[in-house]
C-alpha cells in the first residue's frame, strides 16, 4: 500500500492526498457544526417553527444556485486555460466585481421579494424578516463561493481550507453566543448560522483577494467596461451548461420518491428515503477530491496528457475502491445503530445506492475530461438522459424500495459510464485526425 501511494504521488497528475484530506476535514467540521445546531433548534422550537427555518435554508440555497448558475466552475476552467498572469488577474477582478454587483442587487430586492413571497407562503406571514435574511444570505453565499473558486483556480488549497475553518469557527462562536444570551428567535438563529458567518467570511476573503490583486502595481489600471464584458461573457456562456447540469443532477435519485408517493405503502418510500439520506456522507469525499483535481484536469490541452490522467486514475483504483467500500460497510453499520431496527430494511437500499455511487463517482472523476475537451454539454445530455430513463423505469418496475434503488443507482452508473465512452471516442477521433 505504501509503495502504491508513493508511486501515485510521483505521477504528473497525481491526486493531492493532503489537499483532499484538508478539504474533506474542513467540510466535515462545517457540516457537523451545522447539523448539531440545527438538531438543537429542531428540539427547542418544534416541527412548525423548524419548518420555517428549513424552508429559509432552501430559499438561501436556491438563491445562491441561481446567482452562480455554473459560473464558479466555469471561471476555474477559464482561469486554467489562461497562461498570462495579468489576464488571470483581470479574470479575478471581473468575476469578483460581477458577483459583488449581484450581491448588491439581491440585497436591494430582498425586502420586496420577501414581502411578495410571504403572501403566497403563508408560513412566513409573521416572519418575513427570515425570508429577507434568506435572500441576502443567498447573495453572500454566492460571493463566498466565488472567492473559494478563485483559490481553487489558483490551487491555493490551504487558503481554501482556511476559509471553511474560518466559517466553521464563526458559525460555532455565533451559535454559542446566541444560546448563552438566550436570543433564540428564528431570525437570530438564522443570522448566527448563515448570514453572520458568511458576512464575516466575505470581509476576510475579499480583503485577502484584493491584497493579492494589488501585488502587481504596474498592472493596476482600470479595465474598460467593454473589456470586462469580453472577459465575462465566455465564463457565463460556458457556465450555463454547468448550471443546467447542477439543477438537474439530483432529480434521477428523487424521481423514485415521487413515483412511490401515491402507489405504495409509506414504509417503502421511507426505506428508500432513509437509504438515500446517507449517500451525502460519500459525497463529502467525492466533492473534496473533485475540488482538488478539477483545476488540473480541466486545463489539459492534449490527448497524451488526458491518457496519462486516465492511467493515473486506473492505478489509483485499488486504493479508491478499498477506501470507499470500507466506508460503505462502516456507514451501513452506523445507519443501523442510528435508525434502529425499524429501519433495517433501508440498509440494503443504502448498500445498493452506495455501491452504484462509488462506481459512478469513479467514472465521474474520469469524466472531468469533458471540460478538458471544452464540451460541458456532454454532462447535461447525460443527466437529461438519466432523467428520462429513470422516469420510464419507475412507470414499469415494481414500486418497492429495492427495485427503485437498483433502477436509480443503475441509471446513475450507466450515465457516467456512457459519458466516459463518449469522451474516449472523441479523444480517439482527435488523435486519428492529428
Image (spheres, helix red, strand yellow):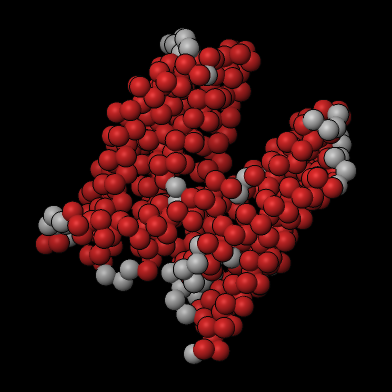
The answer, for residue 63, to whether it is visible in the render is yes
The answer, for residue 361, to whether it is visible in the render is no
Figure check: 6 above or below 73: below
| Residue in the image at 57% along x and 83% along y | 429
Rendering coords of residue 8 (x, y %)? 58, 71
| Residue in the image at 49% along x and 56% along y | 241
Quadrant in the picture for the N terminus: bottom right
> 247 or 201: which is nearer to us?
247
- Image quarter of residue 336: top right
- Looking at the image, residue 322 sits to the left or right of residue 67; the answer is right
| Residue in the image at 75% along x and 41% along y | 256
> 172 or 364: which is nearer to us?
364
Rendering coords of residue 9 (x, y %)? 54, 70
- Looking at the image, residue 49 sits to the left or right of residue 295; the answer is right
- Image quarter of residue 113: top left
Rendering coords of residue 263 (x, y %)? 83, 33
- Looking at the image, residue 386 sits to the left or right of residue 402; the answer is left
Amino acid at each position: 500500500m505504501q509503495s502504491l501511494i508513493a508511486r501515485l504521488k510521483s505521477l504528473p497528475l497525481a491526486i493531492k492526498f493532503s489537499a483532499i484530506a484538508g478539504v474533506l476535514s474542513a467540510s466535515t467540521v462545517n457540516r457537523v457544526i451545522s447539523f448539531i445546531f440545527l438538531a438543537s433548534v429542531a428540539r427547542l422550537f418544534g416541527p412548525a417553527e423548524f419548518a420555517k427555518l428549513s424552508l429559509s435554508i432552501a430559499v438561501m440555497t436556491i438563491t445562491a444556485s441561481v446567482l452562480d448558475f455554473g459560473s464558479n466552475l466555469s471561471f476555474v476552467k477559464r482561469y486554467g486555460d489562461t497562461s498570462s498572469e495579468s489576464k488571470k488577474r483581470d479574470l479575478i477582478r471581473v468575476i469578483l466585481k460581477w458577483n459583488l454587483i449581484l450581491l448588491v442587487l439581491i440585497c436591494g430586492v430582498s425586502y420586496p421579494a420577501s414581502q411578495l413571497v410571504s403572501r403566497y407562503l403563508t408560513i412566513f406571514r409573521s416572519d418575513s424578516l427570515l425570508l429577507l435574511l434568506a435572500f441576502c444570505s443567498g447573495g453572500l453565499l454566492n460571493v463566498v463561493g466565488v472567492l473559494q473558486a478563485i483559490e481553487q483556480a489558483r490551487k491555493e488549497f490551504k487558503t481554501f481550507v482556511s476559509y471553511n475553518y474560518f466559517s466553521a469557527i464563526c458559525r460555532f462562536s455565533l451559535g454559542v453566543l446566541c444560546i448563552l444570551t438566550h436570543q433564540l428567535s428564528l431570525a437570530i438563529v438564522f443570522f448566527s448560522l448563515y448570514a453572520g458567518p458568511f458576512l464575516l467570511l466575505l470581509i476576510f476573503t475579499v480583503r485577502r483577494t484584493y491584497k493579492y490583486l494589488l501585488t502587481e502595481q504596474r498592472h493596476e489600471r482600470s479595465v474598460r467596461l467593454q473589456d470586462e464584458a469580453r472577459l465575462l461573457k465566455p465564463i457565463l456562456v460556458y457556465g450555463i451548461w454547468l448550471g443546467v447540469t447542477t439543477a438537474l443532477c439530483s432529480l434521477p435519485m428523487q424521481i423514485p420518491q415521487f413515483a412511490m408517493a401515491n402507489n405504495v405503502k409509506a414504509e417503502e418510500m421511507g426505506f428508500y428515503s432513509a437509504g438515500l439520506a446517507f449517500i451525502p456522507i460519500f459525497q463529502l469525499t467525492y466533492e473534496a477530491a473533485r475540488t482538488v483535481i478539477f483545476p488540473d484536469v480541466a486545463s489539459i490541452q492534449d490527448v497524451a496528457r488526458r491518457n496519462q490522467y486516465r492511467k493515473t486514475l486506473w492505478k489509483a483504483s485499488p486504493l479508491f475502491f478499498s477506501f470507499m467500500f470500507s466506508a460503505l460497510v462502516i456507514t451501513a453499520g452506523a445507519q443501523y445503530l442510528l435508525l434502529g431496527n425499524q429501519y433495517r430494511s433501508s440498509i440494503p437500499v443504502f448498500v445498493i445506492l452506495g455501491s452504484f455511487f462509488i462506481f459512478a463517482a469513479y467514472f465521474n472523476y474520469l469524466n472531468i475530461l469533458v471540460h478538458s475537451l471544452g464540451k460541458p454539454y456532454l454532462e447535461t445530455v447525460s443527466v437529461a438522459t438519466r432523467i428520462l430513463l429513470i422516469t420510464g423505469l419507475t412507470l414499469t418496475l415494481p414500486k418497492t424500495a429495492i427495485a427503485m434503488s437498483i433502477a436509480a443507482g443503475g441509471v446513475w452508473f450507466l450515465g457516467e459510464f456512457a459519458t466516459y465512452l463518449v469522451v474516449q471516442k472523441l479523444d480517439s477521433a482527435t488523435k486519428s485526425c492529428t
